[in-house]
Image (spheres, grey):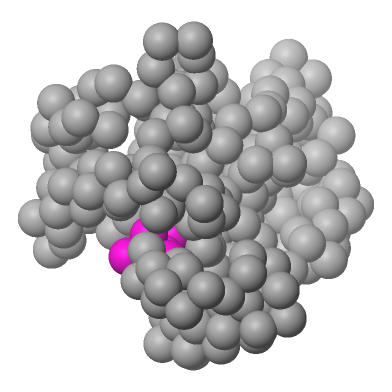
Amino acid sequence: MNSFEKLPAVPLTLEGSSVLHQMLRVRWPIWRALSAGEHRDILDQATATLSTLERQGTAAFSLLGHKGDLMLVHFRPDFDGVSDVEHCLARLRLWDYLELATSYLSVVELGLYESTVKVYASLGERGVEPHSAEWNAEIEETLARQRQAMQPRLFPEMPSHRYICFYPMDRRRGEQKNWYQLPMPERQRQMQDHGAIGRRYAGTVKQIISGSIGFDDWEWGVDLFADDPLVFKRLIYEMRFDEVSAVYALFGSFYLGRRTPPAELPKLFGL
């Protein structure tokens, strides 16, 4: 029996910022029925609030296509912060003229396949029983060390790029192809090859992966930020040929948005 078959199958992960995506539609008929003065008052309040939220880790994007008019993306230290944002927005007068088309909740996640394989192998060779006190202590030591080293990636600032591409995804777990039944070293190999493609685009695309297992309908959310939206097509297309994507990936809806600073909010609403 392979030594890894005796060890936990779950790779170690680090979690950071809580992330909420809100996809919104403008209720245009009732918005147009308002007077010019009401438009200005409502948007003045919304612009001031969005300016404050932007300093706390929020960004607004005007959506391209039929899936919505506006996407708000919020990075916060925890779910309490996300809840505060939701309540803050719900108190805006503008919120009466918006319809929430969908939303997505997740936490920034870094997978530690390489560290997992090393620490599991070390513990296994020494005969340490999985989930024993000694096992848990060494795992936590590894996580603490990695957490400190990865702090900027776990709690990132909102990228300033002009465009965003967001999509949720799963790993296939069907009868014929099941990602979760692959041995740990094989999953590590495929993820390492997959990551190599993304690293080639590091100068033009900022990628933030968030985990959503137990929080939303898919397993991960992917945010890509770039100044040239065509880069999204090239990167995602190239990754489709990678084994982990070609064989094991399932994708949800894609959302493409253009950054809308608070000062440009009135323009989005026709003022």
Residue sitting farthest toward the left = 200
Q: Quadrant of the N terminus?
A: top left
Q: Seen in the image, is 117 located left or right of residue 180?
A: left
* Residue visible at 84% across and 57% down in the picture: 83
Which residues fall within the magenta stretch?
Answer: 110-116
Coordinates of residue 96 in the picture (x, y in percent)? 85, 34
Quadrant of the rendered image containing residue 218: top right
* Residue visible at 66% across and 77% down in the picture: 136
Task: State whether residue 169 is above or below residue 209.
Answer: above
Foreground of the two, 149 or 10: 10
The reply to whether residue 217 is in sight is: yes
Does the segment drawn in magenta span residue 112? yes
Coordinates of residue 235 in the picture (x, y in percent)? 17, 39
Coordinates of residue 104 in the picture (x, y in percent)? 65, 39
Task: State whether residue 135 is above or below residue 200.
Answer: below
Foreground of the two, 133 or 139: 133
Coordinates of residue 209 in the picture (x, y in percent)? 44, 52
Quadrant of the rendered image containing residue 93: top right
